[in-house]
Structure formats: structure tokens, C-alpha cells
Image (cartoon, grey):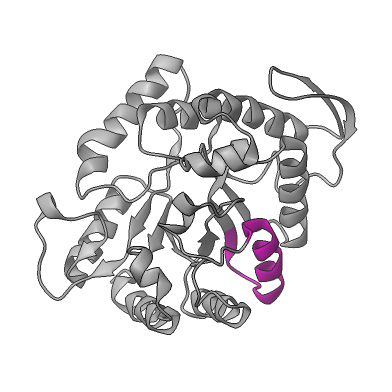
């Protein structure tokens, strides 16, 4: 099971120097991958949760590809209906090539209504737009010249080169905890990427529902690659009152052991707590937490 870390690409402390330091910590501490978040338009509903400035993730990952050598690089999650799929496919293929095949593409449908309004996208149709854009994305990665006709996007005889380095395409993780996300993961994804779930939820609810969705569709069950919090506490937390990855270090270690037992191929650790903490200049403290966690989370 590979373990990665979210790099907070938002907030006053998210300077170029800080982001470069994050990448060095993730790589030097022995983690396997890093991921960054996505918002195209930092509208008030976005900044209420993720204070600005907010770095555009694909630009940032291109930079981080140049200052790292080993770790995989990804999005958690790229909001699919916010970008034209032609641009998305080309940008991601270029990132995969320039990083020597280290890209992982986490995708989702988005949630911020003011952001959708700023981009001229109907949030009520974000699910159907996402599904069609994902079909277009996979088509664009599958051949050198591609035509596509859909309800929301259509194009003819587009030269897609350079295509991704990894074939048939970079790993595609579908984010979200609900039924629609699980169906989308079964249909399009290499992995399901549930986000910050309550302790015990994956075993009791999430994975049985994923297997049921795969059975209904007659398709293989995608891999499990969750994003969990990294919120160590000094006191023990009950499972009724905590997220996976929250509690004493021994509880967090047990959570990772359980995810390994459940067959997770990747686990992403997320230090973000809330807007107030993100607004403070505390990235150095968060990086120290990650370095410390690398020691007590490593398998015995």
C-alpha cells in the first residue's frame, strides 16, 4: 500500500518557497506520492473553506514535477465540469510526459455553487457533464487523432499528441463518497477515491456498496485509494466521534493497518482542518507533523 500526502496549495502560507519545501518533505520522508486540490474560480463559497491565494493545480504540478524525481503527483480532485475536456486531456498528457509517467488523476464533480456560476456551468447538470467529459477524456488519450460527439462537447479530427506516457492513460481515481461517485468509479475509474470518511465507514458501508455497484454494472470492482485526515490528538477518540486518521497515533496506525487489510492500494493523508487553520502561517508546523508521522506510520 502506497502512502501519500496532500500539499496545501491554498492559504497565505502557500508561497512558492513553502510549496517547494512541501515537495521536498514528502519525497525525503519516504512517502510515495503527493496531491493538490483544485478550484478554478476562488469565489466566496470556496474561500470560506480554502482561503486564498489558491494555486491552479496543473500549473503547480508541472513545477513540482521539476523539483521532484521519485514521488507520483496528482489531483484530489480535479473538478471535471470546470474545464473543457480538450484542454484537460492535453494538459494532463503533457504533465504525465514531462514527469516521466508519475501523474495520477483524481477527479470529481465539484460542489461550490458560486464557482459554477462564475464559470457558467449549471451545477444541477454537473454529474452528466462529468460523465460525458470523462468519456471524451478517455477517448482523447486512446488514439492520435480523435473525433467525439456528445451533448456538451463535440469535436472532429483532433490531433491529441503527445499522448500520456503511461498507457492506456494515467491512473484515474474517481472521488466522492456517495452512490453516484461509486457508480462513476465503476464505470470510468481505476480506483475509487472516497474523501475523509468516518472511522469504520469503508468496511461497514462504503466497500459493500462499491461491490454492489460493480456487480450491478457487471464490471470489476475498482481499487480503493481513499483520502483520510491526518489529525493526531493526545487523547483517544471514540470511533463514533472521529474520522479515519483522527485520534492518537496508535489509532491512526490502526486505521492504516485496516485500510491495508481492506485492500487499499494507496492512502492519501490530509493535514487540512478548517479555514481558520489554513489562514494561519503554519505550514512549517504541518510539515513537521508529516515528517513525524512518517516515522510512526511506517510498517513494523
Residue 238, how many percent across, how many down? 9, 57
Q: Is residue 204 left or right of residue 122?
A: left
In the rendered structure, does residue 59 fall within the stretch colored magenta?
Answer: yes
Q: Report which quarter residue 65 is drawn in.
A: bottom right
Residue 114, how many percent across, how many down? 51, 42
Identify which residue is drawn at 41% across, 39% down: 176
Q: Is residue 58 left or right of residue 86?
A: left
Residue 47, how many percent across, how many down? 47, 58
Identify which residue is drawn at 52% across, 63% down: 33
Reply above or below: 171 against 232.
above
Q: Nearer the viewer, residue 8 or 6?
A: 8
User: Is residue 1 visible to us here?
Assistant: no
Quadrant for the C terminus in the image: bottom left
User: Is residue 149 visible to us here?
Assistant: yes
In the rendered structure, does residue 88 fall within the stretch colored magenta?
Answer: no
Q: Could you tell me what secondary structure mostly forms the magenta stretch?
A: helix
Reply above or below: 48 against 202.
below
Residue 98, how many percent across, how many down? 77, 61
Identify which residue is drawn at 29% across, 47% down: 197
Q: Nearer the viewer, residue 93 or 113?
A: 113
Q: How many marks?
A: 0
Identify which residue is drawn at 61% across, 35% down: 81
Q: Nearer the viewer, residue 62 or 173?
A: 62
For the record, the magenta segment spans 56-73
Reply above or below: 143 against 24.
above
Q: Is residue 220 left or right of residue 64?
A: left
Reply above or below: 266 against 287.
above
Q: Nearer the viewer, residue 190 or 140?
A: 140
Quadrant for the N terminus in the image: bottom left
Amino acid at each position: 500500500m502506497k502512502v501519500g500526502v496532500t500539499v496545501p496549495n491554498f492559504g497565505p502560507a502557500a508561497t512558492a518557497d513553502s510549496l517547494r519545501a512541501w515537495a521536498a518533505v514528502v519525497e525525503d520522508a519516504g512517502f510515495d506520492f503527493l496531491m493538490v486540490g483544485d478550484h478554478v474560480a476562488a469565489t466566496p463559497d470556496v474561500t470560506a473553506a480554502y482561503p486564498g491565494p489558491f494555486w491552479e493545480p496543473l500549473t503547480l504540478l508541472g513545477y513540482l514535477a521539476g523539483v521532484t524525481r521519485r514521488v507520483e503527483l496528482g489531483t484530489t480532485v480535479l473538478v471535471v465540469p470546470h474545464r473543457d475536456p480538450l484542454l484537460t486531456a492535453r494538459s494532463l498528457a503533457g504533465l504525465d510526459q514531462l514527469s516521466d509517467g508519475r501523474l495520477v488523476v483524481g477527479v470529481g464533480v465539484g460542489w461550490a455553487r458560486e464557482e459554477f456560476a462564475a464559470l457558467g456551468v449549471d451545477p444541477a447538470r454537473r454529474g452528466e457533464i462529468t460523465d460525458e467529459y470523462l468519456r471524451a477524456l478517455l477517448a482523447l488519450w486512446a488514439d492520435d487523432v480523435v473525433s467525439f460527439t456528445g451533448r456538451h462537447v463535440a469535436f472532429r479530427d483532433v490531433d491529441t499528441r503527445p499522448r500520456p506516457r503511461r498507457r492506456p492513460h494515467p491512473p484515474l481515481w474517481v472521488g466522492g463518497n456517495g452512490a453516484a461517485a461509486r457508480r462513476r468509479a465503476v464505470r470510468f475509474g481505476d480506483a475509487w477515491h472516497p474523501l475523509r470518511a468516518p472511522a469504520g465507514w469503508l468496511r461497514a458501508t462504503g466497500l459493500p456498496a462499491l461491490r454492489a455497484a460493480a456487480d450491478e454494472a457487471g464490471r470489476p470492482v475498482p481499487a480503493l485509494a481513499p483520502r483520510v485526515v491526518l489529525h493526531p490528538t493526545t487523547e483517544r477518540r471514540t470511533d463514533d466521534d472521529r474520522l479515519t486518521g483522527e485520534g492518537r497515533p496508535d489509532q491512526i496506525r490502526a486505521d492504516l493497518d485496516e485500510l491495508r487489510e481492506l485492500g487499499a492500494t494507496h492512502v492519501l493523508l490530509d493535514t487540512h482542518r478548517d479555514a481558520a487553520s489554513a489562514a494561519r502561517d503554519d505550514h512549517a508546523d504541518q510539515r513537521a507533523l508529516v515528517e513525524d508521522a512518517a516515522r510512526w506510520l511506517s510498517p513494523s
